[in-house]
Image (cartoon, rainbow, N blue to C red):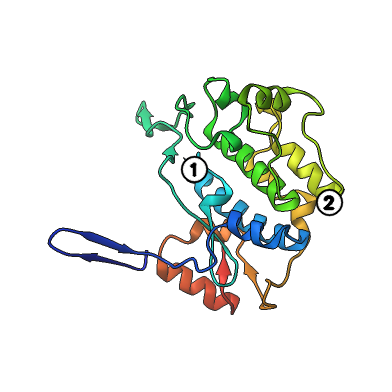
Amino acid sequence: VQQILETKSLTLIVMEYASNGDLLDYINKTTRLQESVARRMFRELCDAIYYIHFRNICHRDLKCENLLLDNHLRIKLADFGFSRYCVDPPRTENKKNVIEKKILSRTFCGSAAYAAPEILRGQEYNPKLYDIWSAGCILYIMIYSKMPFDDSDIKKMIEAQMTKGGLRFGSEGSSEVQDLIARMLQSEVTQRWPIELIQKHPWLAKQTNTDNHGSSISYVNAMTTNRIQTQGGVNQVQKRHGSPIYA
């Protein structure tokens, strides 16, 4: 939020302008992202997911249309209309222990094309792992410029999601990125990787030192991100890194 303006009848919230629109429009214009560009963008998305998941907030509507791009083609996660806090409020027992209970979601939300099979089947679901499935769909689209599953028939799409071999890869994309996508698009929820493991995957570990315009990028690790609570903290870290930071 850049500024908040109030009139007699309106409250206006001024936010950062995403001059390059959303990711889906950008992919449609460019046909297919280079894998190095997809890696850099997806790393930024993973950093955003880690940031909210660490604070027990889930987005529940991750899709290309909700990833906005600034003038340097940096990812900006938008539209938190379906987001929710995914643990019960902390409570104390015997005045000693703080208890936080993870809670499952029951509400169908988001877009069917990006929805995990447990959502489409009307089951209770872990909202963090729902975000992971949706992010896996986004990465697939980045690499292949199409959806991982045909969503024109929801029943058949669920069958493909649940069937071994239902997820198919084209000739594009390295074996490493295909492995990462497969770990995110696991129909068995207990086998689906959380964001902490995804960030350590070898494909993401490869360095992407420049953006599309050749400018240096400095990434802030998760531990540093957790300590940034104010704009002053952001300014301090940026000064220490000597370049813009993206988390």
Q: Give x and y (percent) for residue 84.
A: 42, 38
What is the quadrant of the N terminus in the image?
Answer: bottom left
User: On the image, which quarter does residue 118 sit in?
Assistant: top right
Q: Is residue 14 left or right of residue 124?
A: left
Q: Considering only vertical position in the picture, is 163 above or below 201?
A: above
Q: Which numbered disc, 1 or 2, marks the residue closer to the eye?
A: 2
Residue 97 percent across, percent down from the top left: 42, 31
Vertical placement of 43 versus 70: above or below? Answer: above
Q: Residues within 10 Å of mark 2 (few under 14, many from 20)?
A: few
Quadrant of the frame with the C terminus: bottom right
The amino acid on which the numbered mark 2 sits, given as a three-letter code, is Glu
Q: In this view of the protein, which residue sits in the foreground, 13 or 170?
A: 170
The secondary structure type at the circle numbered 1 is loop
Residue at the (55%, 72%) spot, across then down:
71
Rendered residue at 20%/59% (across/down): 10
Point out residue 158 in the picture as x, y percentages from the top left corner. Answer: 66, 24
Disc marking residue 59: 1
Image point 38% across, 34% down: which residue? 90
Front residue of this view, candidates 175 and 171? 171
In the picture as drawn, the residue positioned furthest to the front comes out as 152
Label disc, if present, on residue 172 of the rendered structure: 2
Q: Residue 42 sits in which quadrant?
A: bottom right
- Residue drawn at the location 78% of the way across and 53% of the way down: 203
